[in-house]
Amino acid sequence: MADDALMVATLDVAGKSNEITAFAPLLDQIGCLKNVVISADRLHTQREHARYLQRRQAFYVFPVGGNQAGLFDQLDALAWKDVPIEWVTYDRGHGRTEIRTIQVMPAPAGTRFPHVKQVFLLERHVYDLRWKPLSAVAVLGVTSLPAELAGPRRLAELIRGEWSIENKDHYVRDVTLGEDRCRVRTASAPSILAVMRSYAIGALRLLNHTNIAEGTRWARDDFRNPLIALGLTL
């Protein structure tokens, strides 16, 4: 996914495999990754993934969870109370207030992960409009980006961008385009439909449709509009 939530590559995961083994083959579809920042969820915080990205001259921003228990314990034991909060964002809307903070430090010597340059702690607190706590999430992570390329603000933006992809593509596919309700289950048809949904979302976004439900109605209401979206008109 690009920053604007456009799908640039896709790969079907075999039934007897998993997303971890698909990481490198998926990115192999993209010709040049030099200086590209790759973010992913905890599942892909794998040492071999970090080495692969280093070979491709790319950078990573990875959260650290239970699948890397030793690394998590190492980061969790750092003296975060002595690290200043260097970037804060406030968002208010949909009946709640969300506060995000990030603390960043150089990766300590002996950090057990390849090519790591910085480590971070991001916290997200959500309150209702009367400041009653609704949720709190803390995320530890590692990145190969050096401080001169990505300070606290940029790292916070990259992490938030990864979370927003879940809303921009997966949520829209599930809810707006009804992927979860789709009864097609046989052969390659589910994968083909998933790719078609993502490409449809991307085509509508390239036409500046920020509301995909509204965009699908626009495409439905005039047979010429899907042709416009696909660039098939003169």
Image: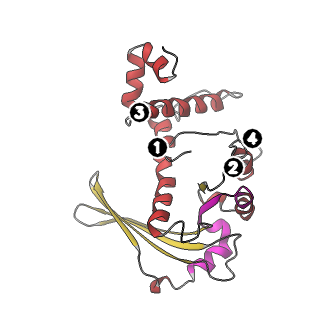
Q: Which mark is residue 14?
A: 4
Q: Secondary structure at mark 4?
A: loop
Q: Residues within 10 Å of mark 1 (few under 14, many from 20)?
A: some
Residue 2, by quadrant, is top right
Q: Secondary structure at mark 3?
A: helix
Name the residue tied to disc 1: 168
Q: Residues within 10 Å of mark 2 (few under 14, many from 20)?
A: some
Between 152 and 141, which is closer to the camera in this rendering?
152
Q: Secondary structure at mark 1?
A: helix
- Spot occupied by residue 58 in the image (x, y as percentages of width and height): 66, 57
- The answer to which of marks 3 and 4 sits earlier in the sequence is 4
Amino acid at circle 2: Glu
**Closer to the camera: disc 1 or disc 2?**
1
Query: Which region shows up in magenta?
Result: 53-76
Q: Secondary structure at mark 2?
A: helix
Q: How far apart are the two marked residues, 3 and 1, measured between alpha carbons?
A: 9 Å
State the residue at coordinates (46%, 82%).
83
Q: Magenta stretch: residue 59 in it?
A: yes
Quadrant where the N terminus is found in the figure? top right
Name the residue tied to disc 3: 212
Q: How far apart are the two marked residues, 1 and 2, measured between alpha carbons?
A: 20 Å
- The answer to which of marks 4 and 1 sits earlier in the sequence is 4
Q: How far apart are the two marked residues, 3 and 4, measured between alpha carbons?
A: 30 Å
User: Mark 3–mark 2 contact, CB under 8 Å?
Assistant: no
State the residue at coordinates (44%, 69%).
123
Q: Residues within 10 Å of mark 3 (few under 14, many from 20)?
A: many
Q: Which mark is residue 19?
A: 2
**Closer to the camera: disc 4 or disc 1?**
1
